[in-house]
Image (cartoon, rainbow, N blue to C red):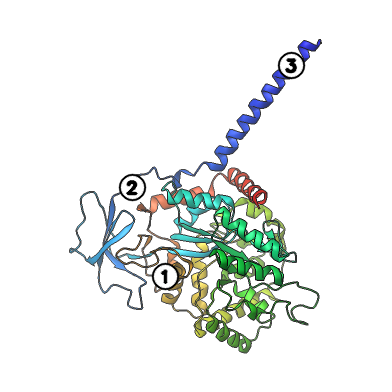
Amino acid sequence: MNTKTVKQWLKRVAAAIGIIVIGFTVWLWFIVNQLPVTLQPNQAKPIGVLFNNVRVLSMVDESSVSPGMQAVLVIGDRITKIGVVGEVEAPEGVLVIDAQGKTLMPGLIDAHIHLHDETELAAYLAHGVTGVRNMSGYPFHLRLIAQKTKGQLIAPDLLTTGPILNSHGPNAVILQTTVNTAEEARFAVRKQHQSGYRHVKVYSNLTPEAYAAILEESALLGMTVSGHSPEGDRTTGIPRKKPFEIPWESSLGKGLTTLEHIETIVWHGLRDDLSPEKMAVLAKTLAQSGEAVTPTLIAHQRLVLIAQSKGAYLTRPGSDMINPLVTWFASGAQKFWSQMDASVYEAPHAKFFLQATALLHQAGVPLLTGTDSGSFGIVPGESVARELELLVTAGLSPFEALTSVTRRNAELLGFEKTGQILPGYRANLVLLAKDPLTDVGVVEHPVGVMIDGYWLDQQKLAAMKDTARTSKATVFFRSLVRVVEMKLSA
């Protein structure tokens, strides 16, 4: 083969490789950016909806249940009028829904999730969740927020922190941003702000200097801070033989919006001492300080249920809506918990966490409803109903639990004009066949959901569930790409 022939052959090979690279790039772009059909705003959108013959649970106050059947008029995405049946007229073109005595309430808000893919948004809507706070930010979360703002995405309202900030230690994982010094911490907060994040998530291993710098820089930039109460370096003997490097009380009064996970509070605040007396004192201290708490009781309870069922809990109905990358990544943990004897540690702790949550509530600590969905074994959307049931078991009344998942989550986290049924509020609504004040678990099965002016009936909600179940290979790949993107941008 002469030189000229070799050059021609190399050109053909180079051209072929170029075509393959271009084709792969186009395919990758399509896979990563293509929205599921059910979340695309190309379906018919009424100019408004009139809910007639409906029992209204407004969540405004203790007298929130309407005395009789009501009519609620929505124009666009706003509630415009609430009145007695027959006194509220439907303008021309408005969809009229005869609710036949069903209950209309504000959409649910999950205050603690980890979103890995758009298909999970469909699962949330299918279960009546119209707002979520994501607690570990990726760049694609900011893109989703922008798409929803522009009307290009049907999805729950979405707030997100930036990537989790943590220092080296036993709770550090690859998906977090590691900051050990004050300089590293300030740089990380500024970078998150420049990227578009407005909420910061702190974690357990943060060093004293990094934690102090995060609080200072976040306050300077007007960013909220939430998360675990940082412990500092967890050396041998902590917590039972010697105290944490950063005392639990040092997180109080520092401007944190919420403290996450009741087990973190018991671990750090009580040094894992399951003492009701000490917990009562802690609860009073926290109530005076003013921080809200997201107990995420289901996050620990699922470990008990996995262990007690020898792993069968992991394959219960609805588990096919859990992100496949999460399931794969946590395969070792799932096997571990399936073989664990829960009676030794997990079950007694789960029982105490209910008691601790009750003591927080009795002391007046604001409790939010969050699930830690996006972790293994926790079904997106469905888990909100289980969390509400646990809050009621802990001692909250059904109304108090429903207040937590609607009005309080909205007000404390900054979800604008939602969480209550009032004129001028956004029509993030859920229609239920049964009374949630009798059984909070009925919120799991809405008859219909309204979001962004769209009415999602049972058929559309079923399609949302199908979206969350299908295309596992695509979802796995897309989720993996988002992880890589996040790490490259950190």
> In terms of sequence position, does the residue under pointer 3 or pointer 1 come before the other?
3
Picture layout, residue 231 above or below residue 217: below
Q: Taking 5 as reference, is 278 left or right?
A: left
Nearest to N terminus: mark 2 or mark 3: 3
Tell me where residue 348 sits by quadrant: bottom right
| Image point (62%, 33%), residue name | 24
Q: x, y (%) of residue 72?
A: 27, 62
Q: Relative to residue 104, is residue 145 depicted above or below? A: above
Residue that appears at 63% across and 74% down: 263
Kindly indicate the quadrant of the structure image that contains residue 402: bottom left
Q: CA distance from mark 1 to mark 2?
A: 26 Å
Kindly give the residue lying farthest to the bottom in the view shown: 277
Q: On residue 407, which mark appears?
A: 1
Whole-angstrom CA distance, mark 2 to mark 3, is: 56 Å
Q: CA distance from mark 3 to mark 1?
A: 68 Å
**Type of amino acid at the residue the image marks with label 2:** Lys
Between discs 1 and 2, the one toward the N terminus: 2
Secondary element at image label 2: loop
User: Which three-letter amino acid code belongs to the residue tagged 1?
Assistant: Arg
Query: Hey, which quadrant is residue 32 in on the image?
Result: top right
Residue 158 position within the rendered picture, expressed as x and y whole percent measured from the top left: 49, 57
User: Which residue position holds label 3?
Assistant: 9
On the picture, is 389 further left or further right than 323? Answer: left
Bin the neighbour count of mark 3 within 10 Å (Cα to Cα): few under 14, some 14-19, many 20 and up: few
Dot 2 alpha-carbon crowd within 10 angstroms: few under 14, some 14 to 19, many 20 or more: some
**In the rendered image, the vertical position of residue 78 relative to residue 420, given as above or below:** above
Instruction: Tell me if I can see residue 28 in this picture.
Output: yes
> Could one spot residue 206 in this view of the protein?
no
Determine crowd level at label 1: few under 14, some 14-19, many 20+ residues with C-alpha closer than 10 A. Answer: many
Per the image, the residue denoted by label 2 is 45
Q: Quadrant of the N terminus?
A: top right
